Image: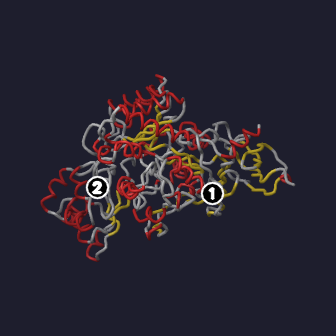
Amino acid sequence: MPLYDRVIRNGMIIDGTRVPRFRGDIAIKDGLIAEIGHIDPSDAAEVIDATGLIVAPGFVDLHTHYDAQLFWDPYCTLSSWHGITSVVIGNCGFGFAPVKPEMRERSMLSMTRVEAIPLASMQAGMPWDWVTFPEFLDSVDRAPKAVNILPYVPIGPLLIWVLGFDDAKAGRKPTDAEHKEICRLLNEAMDAGGCGWSAQRMMPTGPAAVQRDFDGTPMPTDVMHDDTCRELAKVLRRRNQGFMQMLMISGDNARDQAFYEELSELSGRPMIMNVVQAFDHRPEIHRRVLAWLRSCREKGIRVVGQGLTTDAGFAFTFEDWNLFDDAQAWCEATTGTLQEKKQKLGDPARRQLLKDLMPKTATGPLPEIVITGPKLEKNKQWLDHTLALAGQKMGKHPVDVMLDMAVEEDLKTEFFAAPPNGKIEHLREIVADPYILFGVSDGGAHTKFLTAGRYPTETICKVVREHGMISLEEAHWRLAALPAQFAGFEDRGVLKKGAPADIVVYDYDKLEVLAPEIVHDLPGGEWRRIQRAKGYRYILVNGEVTIRDDQQTETYSGELLRHGVGRRTSQALAAE
C-alpha cells in the first residue's frame, strides 16, 4: 500500500514564509502535508509532475459575500478559479443568521442593493434549513464545498433579532438587557465556530452614504450605537478569541480611526479595516491612511488595513446600478421599479441636482465613464466614447448624455466606470506597505458589475511579473500566510509538515487573467460577469485536486473551518 496519497514532484516551492524558493517534493497523506524534501515517487499512489512550475500555498480571500452563493456554487467562483482555497464569509455585518422564518424574504432583499446579489438567485438557491447561527453553520457544513469556508458573525442579523426590524434600522440604542442578549447571541455563534464579528459602519453619525439597503435606507450596522460595538469587543476580550472586521470606504477620518483603535485595544484582538483605496484625484487620502496604520503598529495596536489592489472596473446598466448612493439625489433616483427609475432618471426637474452632485468617490469622476453598450442603432456612434467626449460632440452635459441614452434604451445601455485607483505609482505606494492585506474581492457580490475575484492572479501578473514591486516570495506571503494569520485561520497559509494541503501549482510565465464574459449560470435564470484564469495546472484543497489545467474536477474537498480549524487538522491533533 502506498505510503502517501500523492506527491507533487520537482516543483519550485515557495512556502509562504518569505524564505527563498527551493526545488523539492511535497508528499500528501489524509489531506495534510506529510513531508517536504526529496521523496521517492514510488511511495505515492499519484504523482503530480511540477517540473518548471511554482508550488505555493493556496490563497486566502478575506473579503467575500459567498454566504448565499456557496449553497449553489461549491467552487465559490470567481475566487477558486484564481487559486483561492479558503474564503471568509459574514463580512460587513451582512448575513443570513439568525433570521426568523418570516424575515427570510426581507433578509434576501437587503442583499439586492448593498451587495447586488440577484433576488431570484437567492430565492431559488438557498435552502433556508436554519434559523439560528449554529444551525446556519451546520447547513454550511453539510453543503458540498470545493473551498474552505471561515465564518465571521455578521452583526446586522443580531441587531434585527434583538431590537426588532424597525428599531434596528432606526439605530435605537439597545437597553442593558438587549445588549446582554446581543452578546449572548455572539457567544452562541462563536461557540458554534464563528471566528469574530463584522460590521459596516459607513454612516454611524450622519446621512446614508454608499452601500445601502434595497430601498435606499441605511443598513442596521450603519446606524448602530458605538456602545454596541464596545459591548461586542468586550465579548472577544472575555473569550480572548476572535477578530473584528469593519468597513469604511477610505478610513480617512480621525474620529473613525480613533474608534478602530479603541475597539482593538478594548478587545485585545485584531481589527481588519476596510478599505485602503487610492483615489487618483486625491492621493493624500490613501497616504494619510497608510501613515495612520503605521502609527498603529508603532503603538502596538492591532489594526490592519485591507487594500484594494485590483484595477477591475465596473461594467453596469441602470437596471441594477447602486454605487452612486453616496449622493442622496442619485440614490433616490436609482431606487424603485424599472418604470419608476426610468421616470425619475428622465425627469428634467431632477437633472440640475444630479449634475450638481455628480458622484466622484465610488467609481471616479463621472465624465470619464465610457459608453460600452449602446443598444439603438443611432446611438452606436458613441461606442467607446467617454461621457465627456460624447457631451462635447453633442453639446450636452455628461449627465444628460448618460441618462438620456439610458432612459431611451430602457435602462439597458451598458457603461464602464474605471476604478479611481488607476495610477501605477499609487498602487506601488499601497503595495510597499508590507502589512497591507491584498484583495477586497467582494466575491459573490456585485455579480453583474465586478470581477475583482481575479486579484490573486492579477497580483502575480501585474504587481510581481510586470512591475516588479515585490518578490514572488513576498507576494505569496501577502496572498496566503498574512491574511490567514490576521483573520483567524489556525492552520493555513504556509506549506509545512502537518499543515493542510491547500496548494496551487502554476506556470509563472503563462499565468494570466482572461477576458470578461457574461454567463447565465445563476439560479433563478440570472446572469453574471466572470473572468477566468489561465496557467493554474493544479489547485489542491485539503490534498484533493479541485482544479486541473484551469478546469474544475468537481471534487468537493473543502471544509467549514469552525474556530479557524478544519476537521482533518482537529483529528490529527486529537490523534497525537
Q: Nearer the viewer, residue 135 or 109?
A: 135
| Residue 327 percent coordinates (x, y) | 24, 49
Question: As drawn, is 406 to the left or to the right of 251?
Answer: left
Say which mark, if any, is on residue 334.
none
Residue at image mark 2 = 215
Where's the N terminus, which quadrant?
Answer: bottom right
Q: Do the residues under discs 1 and 2 have CB atoms within 8 angstroms?
A: no
| Residue closest to the far left | 349
- Classify the position of the C terminus by image quarter: top right
Q: Position of residue 187 (x, y in %)?
A: 50, 37
- Per the image, label 2 sits on a secondary structure element best described as loop
Q: Quadrant of residue 42?
A: bottom right
The three-letter code of the residue at mark 1 reads Tyr
Residue with the mark numbered 1: 536
Label 1 element class? strand
User: In the displayed structure, does residue 508 sit left or right of residue 267?
Assistant: right
Residue 195 visible in the displayed image: yes
